[in-house]
Image (cartoon, helix red, strand yellow):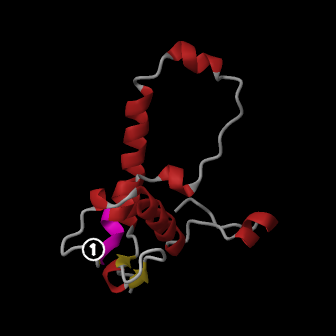
């Protein structure tokens, strides 16, 4: 059975001796929630964009989105972090930028969203659509 509550892993923070974070796999609901939150933030940001400035970029080639660009990081962290050694309660807002970025990459990798270097080189990478 594919229950995320049964798929947990404790990982050591590689640059903080003795610190650990327990993660669970992401559910379909969690992924959709993180994708939707990112989309809503992008829409809100676009409402403030000056259309004349946007026209100046109309000839610029399309930017390729990475998995990190597709999901709201706070949502990914909230749905994945179960416990940690830092405190009794988990508040993702307390994470420093280094640990936050490391965790987002780790969560996406553990859930099959990041390519390995070999996959990138030979073009047989994992799909970023779920």
Question: Horizontally, is 93 left or right of 38 in the view?
Answer: left
Of 5 and 9, the residue lying toward us: 9
Q: Is the residue 15 above or below the residue 93 in the image?
A: below
State the extent of the magenta-drawn residues as a range.
78-83
Query: Residue at label 1?
Result: 86
Residue 13 in the image: x percent, y percent?
43, 76
Q: Is the residue 57 above or below the residue 14 in the image?
A: above
Secondary structure state at the residue bearing disc 1: loop
Residue 46 in the image: x percent, y percent?
44, 28
Residue found at the very far right of the displayed protein: 122
Q: Residue at x 38, y 39 (%)?
A: 41
Of 74 and 65, the residue lying toward us: 74
Q: Name the quadrant containing residue 55.
A: top right
Residue 29 forms part of the magenta stretch:
no
Residue 102 in the image: x percent, y percent?
48, 65
Of 11 and 43, the residue lying toward us: 11
Q: Residue at x 41, y 34 (%)?
A: 43
């Amino acid at each position: 059975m594919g229950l995320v509550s049964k798929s947990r892993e404790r990982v050591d923070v590689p640059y903080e001796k003795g610190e650990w974070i327990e993660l669970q796999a992401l559910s379909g609901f969690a992924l959709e929630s993180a994708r939707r939150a990112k989309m809503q933030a992008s829409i809100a940001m676009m409402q403030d964009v000056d259309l004349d400035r946007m026209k100046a970029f109309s000839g610029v080639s399309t930017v390729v989105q990475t998995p990190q660009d597709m999901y709201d990081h706070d949502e990914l962290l909230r749905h994945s972090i179960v416990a940690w050694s830092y405190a009794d309660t988990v508040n993702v807002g307390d994470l420093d930028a280094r640990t936050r970025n490391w965790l987002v990459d780790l969560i996406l990798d553990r859930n099959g969203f990041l390519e390995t270097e070999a996959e990138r080189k030979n073009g047989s990478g994992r799909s970023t659509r779920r």
